[in-house]
Image (tube, rainbow, N blue to C red):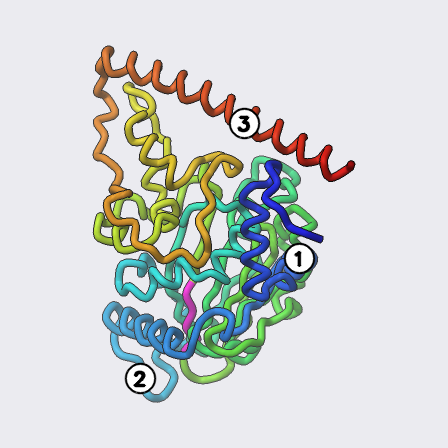
């Protein structure tokens, strides 16, 4: 089947072709059928990339918590999240944009998703473990929609196996569309499927999949990096748009600014939407995936001065003249967007008729 740039899914078809180029179509199938997938190290990056990530993680852990001992018991009975590590080393920015990880994440939650969390994780031998859960925390509904609202990658800094205290999954649980009950948490504690994969691998899953971790029997530390991405209307777990610098935005591609959510429309102030900034945002990201520009997974061109940090808005400020001008500009922009959408539909219909004849 020829994958075209259909008007009905303008970004999805481009993403699909790039995932095919990366050899990840089987991973798409595993995500859809089982709820999680593992990407081997050679599809994540070269050996020197993995070595840099490991060195950076170890450096962060030792600076914050002290040196790792030689007896493998420094982190005995501990299962510790190391928060907010993104700005500790530039190699983490590369990992955030990793084509395999970001590509599969975008398959799950859209090509305009934003970064929610980027943390390290250290786990030692003994009693430390993560209980069974899912990452969709909407308890207001009895059943969840079939599509996840957020998705994760675990980058394995060290080898993973059951004896290493690996993350575990309940295959197919994403289709149950509900959180586990207390009895199920107990039942699956030692029955969930452990990930067995070498360092440098990535496991990716959506927020509906049940997962936990095994107890670590081996000496030493299990090291990992957790990246969580969410749909753009959700509140992030980390303050990335508040902490990203102009230097970081400029040295990275346009997609990085979208992940930082520096152009997110919310929250509104009395002045309402910033139309001037909205024009700048049009080249970066939209909250609507089908009108958001597609940025290639392989794009590494620095954004330079095409992007900027989020202004420090005074949400109580109001200028009637500026407000009126913004309303007019938005109306004109909306009319242009509707006209463009209508042209795309007509072009798609014309192409469909041509294919049929």
**Of pointers 3 and 1, the one earlier in the residue sequence:** 1
Counting from the top left corner in percent of width and height, residue 197 is at 55, 76
Q: Which of the two discs, 3 and 1, sits closer to the camera?
A: 3
* Label 3 to label 1: alpha-carbon separation: 47 Å
- SS label for mark 2: loop
Instruction: Assess disc 1: are there few (<14), some (14-19) or many (≥20) residues with their C-alpha within 10 Å of its C-alpha.
Output: few
Name the image quarter holding residue 293: top left
> Residue 199 placed where, x, y %?
47, 77
The answer to whether 340 is drawn above or below residue 250 in the figure is above
Mark 3, residues whose alpha carbon is within 10 Å: few (<14), some, or many (≥20)?
some
Dot label at residue 184: 1
**Is residue 224 on the magenta stretch?**
yes
Name the one closer to the observer, 180 or 355: 355
From which residue to which does the magenta span run?
Answer: 221-225
Q: CA distance from mark 2 to mark 3?
A: 61 Å
Q: Whole-Å distance between the Cαs marked 2 and 1?
A: 37 Å
Q: Residue at x 50, y 72 (%)?
A: 201
Q: Which residue is mark 3?
A: 341
């Amino acid at each position: 089947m020829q994958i075209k740039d259909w008007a009905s899914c303008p970004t999805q078809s481009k993403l699909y072709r790039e995932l095919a180029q990366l050899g990840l179509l089987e991973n798409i199938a595993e995500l859809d059928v089982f709820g999680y997938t593992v990407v081997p190290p050679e599809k994540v990056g070269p050996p020197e990339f993995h070595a840099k990530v490991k060195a950076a993680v170890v450096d962060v852990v030792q600076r914050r918590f002290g040196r790792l001992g030689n007896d493998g018991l420094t982190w005995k009975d501990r299962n510790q999240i190391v928060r907010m590590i993104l700005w500790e080393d530039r190699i983490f920015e590369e990992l955030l944009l990793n084509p395999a990880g970001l590509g599969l994440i975008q398959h799950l939650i859209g090509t305009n998703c934003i970064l929610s969390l980027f943390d390290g994780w250290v786990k030692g031998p003994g009693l430390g473990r993560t209980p069974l859960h899912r990452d969709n925390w909407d308890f207001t509904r009895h059943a969840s929609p079939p599509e996840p609202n957020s998705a994760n990658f675990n980058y394995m800094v060290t080898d993973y196996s059951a004896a290493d205290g690996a993350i575990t999954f309940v295959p197919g649980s994403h289709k149950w569309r509900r959180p586990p009950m207390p009895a199920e948490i107990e039942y699956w504690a030692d029955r969930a499927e452990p990930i067995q994969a070498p360092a440098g691998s990535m496991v990716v899953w959506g927020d509906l999949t049940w997962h936990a971790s095994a107890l670590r029997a081996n000496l030493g530390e299990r090291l990992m990096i957790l990246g969580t991405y969410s749909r753009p209307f959700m509140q992030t777990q980390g303050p990335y748009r508040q902490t990203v610098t102009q230097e970081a935005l400029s040295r990275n591609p346009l997609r990085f600014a979208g992940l930082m959510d520096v152009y997110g429309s919310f929250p509104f102030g009395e002045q309402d939407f910033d139309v001037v900034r909205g024009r700048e945002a049009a080249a970066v990201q939209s909250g609507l995936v089908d009108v958001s520009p597609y940025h290639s997974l392989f794009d590494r061109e620095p954004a330079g001065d095409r992007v900027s940090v989020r202004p420090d808005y005074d949400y109580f400020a109001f200028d009637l003249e500026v407000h009126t001008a913004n309303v007019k500009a938005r109306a004109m922009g909306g009319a242009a967007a509707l006209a463009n959408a209508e042209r795309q539909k007509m072009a798609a219909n014309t192409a469909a008729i041509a294919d049929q004849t």
